[in-house]
Image (cartoon, rainbow, N blue to C red):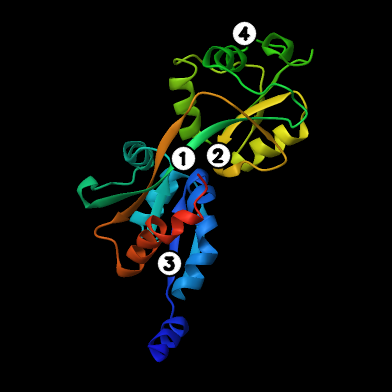
């Protein structure tokens, strides 16, 4: 057995997974090191967006594309860019569940927010933290420009389709949303649970979940299947829930 193991380690394959930030933060970045140790393979984690992940998969640049959005929205995004998608050739595996959570600054004493309160805050109707049990400070809503899946789900399920307030602190991706909230005592923002850390405080709020999917073009290759099997098995110990 030992000689075989040594050979596997020496001839480990490179596997490329790419796509949305939530799926990378929750699943593929945390399982990278343990997966590599267990298999001798190298897992390259290439963050872009769910749509770009699918486009790269179809161009042969990735072994797996992932996102915390429905496959339909990945396909629609790719087709908008003129990429022809043969839906029947795509194989989807659910690898985890993404939870969108509410971040505030650690100094904020507000511990929970209802759907109605969140709707008021994010549409601009509630403008001061004292209206929801906090200090007398103007609320600063932090909103990501490069987090379309998260934004769409939040607008639909929490804002009932209403638009986000005009007066917001615009930023880009998940990491930047967290950084902005961490640096701004009056801030509030939404992010995947996988990004929660000590720089921000998570507020109790209604559950917002979305399956995290991994997509292959055709039946998964042997090396892509190794990643999927690992993530669904041993890897669940490392996936951020």
Q: Are marks 3 and 2 in contact (CB under 8 Å)?
A: no
Q: Which mark is residue 193?
A: 2
Side (left or right) of 43 relative to 85: right
Dot 2 crowding, Cα within 10 Å, few <14, some 14–19, many 20+:
many
In the picture, the quarter occupied by the N terminus is bottom left
Q: Check disc 4 and report its element: helix, strand or loop.
A: loop
Residue, disc 1: 98
Q: Earlier in the sequence, mark 3 or mark 1?
A: 3
Q: Position of residue 115 (x, y in %)?
A: 52, 16
Q: Check disc 2 and report its element: helix, strand or loop.
A: helix
Rendered residue at 60%/16% (across/down): 165
Residue, disc 4: 125
Dot 1 crowding, Cα within 10 Å, few <14, some 14–19, many 20+:
many
Q: Earlier in the sequence, mark 4 or mark 2?
A: 4
Q: Position of residue 54 (x, y in %)?
A: 38, 49
Q: Are marks 1 and 4 in contact (CB under 8 Å)?
A: no
Mark-to-mark CA distance, 3 and 4:
48 Å
């Amino acid at each position: 057995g030992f000689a075989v193991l040594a050979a596997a380690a020496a001839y480990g394959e490179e596997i490329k997974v790419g796509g949305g930030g939530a799926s990378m933060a929750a699943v593929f970045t945390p399982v990278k090191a343990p997966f590599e140790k267990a298999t001798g393979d190298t897992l390259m984690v290439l963050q872009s967006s769910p749509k770009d992940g699918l486009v790269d998969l179809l161009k042969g640049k990735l072994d797996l594309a992932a996102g915390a959005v429905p496959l339909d929205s990945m396909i629609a995004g790719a087709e908008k860019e003129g990429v022809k998608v043969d839906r029947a050739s795509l194989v989807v595996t659910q690898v985890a569940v993404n939870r969108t959570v509410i971040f505030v600054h650690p100094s904020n004493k507000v511990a929970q927010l209802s759907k109605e309160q969140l709707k008021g805050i994010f549409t601009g109707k509630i403008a001061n933290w004292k209206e929801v049990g906090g200090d007398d400070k103007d609320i600063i809503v932090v909103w990501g420009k490069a987090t379309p899946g998260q934004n769409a789900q939040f607008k639909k399920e929490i804002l009932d389709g209403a638009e986000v307030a005009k007066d917001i602190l615009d930023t880009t991706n998940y990491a930047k949303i967290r950084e902005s909230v961490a640096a701004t005592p009056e801030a509030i923002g939404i992010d995947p649970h996988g990004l929660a850390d000590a720089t921000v405080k998570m507020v109790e709020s209604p559950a917002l979940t979305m399956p995290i999917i991994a997509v292959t073009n055709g039946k998964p290759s042997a090396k892509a299947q190794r990643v999927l099997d690992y993530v669904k098995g041993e890897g669940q110990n490392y996936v951020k829930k």
